[in-house]
Amino acid sequence: LSTYSVELLASVKRGSGQPLRRQIEDQLRRAIRSCTLKLGSPLASTRDFARQLGVSRPVVVQAYAQLAAEGYIVIKRGARPRVARCIGSCRQRGARRQTTISSPKVDFRPASPDLSAFPRSAWLRSLRAALATMPNDAFGHGDPMGEEALRQVLAEYLGRVRGLVADADRLVVVNGHTHGRGLVCRMLKAAGVKRVAVEDPCQPGLPAAVESAGLKVLPIPIDCDGIDVHALYRSPAEAVFLTPAHQFPIGAVMSGERRTAVLGWLRDRDAIAVENDYDAEYRYDRPPVSALQALEPDRIVYEGTTSQTLAPALQLAWLVVPPALLATARRDQDDYGWGAPRIEQYAFADFLLRGELDRHLRRQRASYRSRRDALLQALKKSLPEATVCGISAGLHATIAFPKADDERAIQREAQRRGVAVSTLSQSEIIHRARPPMLVLGYANVNEATIGVGVNELAAAVRAARLRRPVSN
Ligand SMILES: Cc1ncc(COP(=O)(O)O)c(C=O)c1O
């Protein structure tokens, strides 16, 4: 029997007319039914619980015995009492979820890099170095804008790798991309922006984030050169969200002409752009293009993240903010207390300084290129009628099917075969005439599994065609 003591949130009222034993039983029963106490979780020993409540031990013994008789808890000699793992009458949400979610055999949804490639040893070295060198003060609340040590090396890295105009003072370290995106929306609102143009299709979740800051979303179509700048001019937008290095999800790289046109629009309208550079470190068959921010640093907010280069688990991302918006960023970070974890920031600074990110990216580029090539080969063999785009960079490809196909039906059939894919409609704001399309992330699937997954996908496409209603 382990000796740690379990705290339980409960109390008793003397003189309430209800026996103390009943009060304890009722509270535990309620907590178990409402999932506050989870199935299988440990309970305090009768001795500890009696001490916590200030009652005699037999009162708790009787209450536990009653709950055990009802099947809510399990009492075994020599073991800590526990909430039962399965309770006939209790419908705990978590328990039901566990039985309905089954993970796919092949997951092509575009969400993460190769999770098995996380550089554990190098990260551990940096974490150790951080813990060994952080002054005692660094374990307190830090600067909510981020650690100076990290901002300095990040500014150097971003200048070197992405051509960014970024000194440390413009950098804000945030708790992952989603936090950064929310902060950007609030900064736009505070700057007086009311209407925000968003590439359509775009990252799912972006329109809702813009709206939840009280801003109006204006969907702007894109083509294979990037956002439609004529449509941008026709709109009353005062800001625009862009993914110039690798449009999400189509995969287009914004052309030189389009970049010039976007910069012209920014100046003509005195507008602000938000550049999401989420996977720009990965490019395969094209020369690097610098971040757009480098060309108009006082009108562009830059968003970067470790989510695609290292792992979403780190939840470390950053913004490079034009000077005019910095005060709002600081106020927001102060108000919400959302500075990123300091120990990880020190570790990441060490990781960058040692050149570990550069090393990791060199290795991963080669690996992702092989995975991408395996995907292309498998598609050519099993689905020759599909057109593939967006593959010169990033970690996902977009696959267009003949017009008569139905992307949702293909997704459903693929799911039945254990293959998870995303449809383009999941990223659309407005549905426009276009071929059916799937978005396939290949970074977290090894080459052999890519082949298996594409075979299953081809079977799913055929099955979806067979189920199609015959039109006259
Ligand atoms: C367009 C885009 N931006 C940003 C991210 C990073 O988001 P997160 O940190 O939530 O994984 C992703 C991840 O897939 C993405 O597709």
Image (cartoon, grey):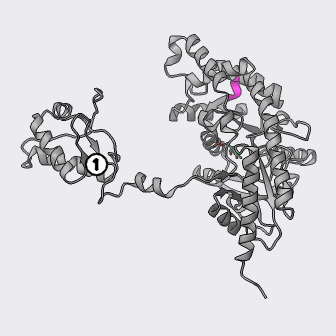
Residue type at the position of mark 1: Ala
Few, some or many residues within 10 Å of mark 1 (<14, 14–19, 20+): some
Residue 311, x across and y down, in percent: 65, 35
Find out whether residue 169 is within the magenta segment: yes
User: Residue, x 30% and y 59% (percent of image)?
Assistant: 88
Image coordinates for residue 40, horizontal then vertical, percent: 34, 44
At a point 57% along the width and 30% down the height, the residue shown is 340
Q: x and y percent of residue 282 in the render?
A: 80, 38
* 14 inside magenta stretch: no
Q: Is residue 24 left or right of residue 186?
A: left
Q: Position of residue 142 (x, y in %)?
A: 54, 22
Looking at the image, which is closer to me, 13 or 279? 279
Q: Quadrant of ligand 1?
A: top right
Q: Nearer the viewer, residue 58 or 258?
A: 58
- Residue found 81% across the figure and 67% down from its top: 435
User: Is residue 54 at all visible to an observer of this figure?
Assistant: yes
The prevailing secondary structure element of the residues shown in magenta is helix
Q: Is residue 37 left or right of residue 219?
A: left
Q: Quadrant of residue 398?
A: bottom right
* Residue shown at 77% from the left, 46% from the top: 243
Q: Quadrant of the N terminus?
A: top left
Q: Nearer the viewer, residue 461 or 218?
A: 461
Q: Look at the numbered disc 1 and give the secondary structure of its residue.
A: helix
Query: Disc 1 beta carbon < 8 A from ligand 1?
Result: no
Q: Looking at the rendering, in which quadrant would you find the C terminus? A: bottom right
Residue pushed farthest bottom? 472
Q: Is residue 237 visible?
A: no
**Residue under label 1:** 31
Which segment did they paint magenta? 167-171
- Total residue callouts: 1
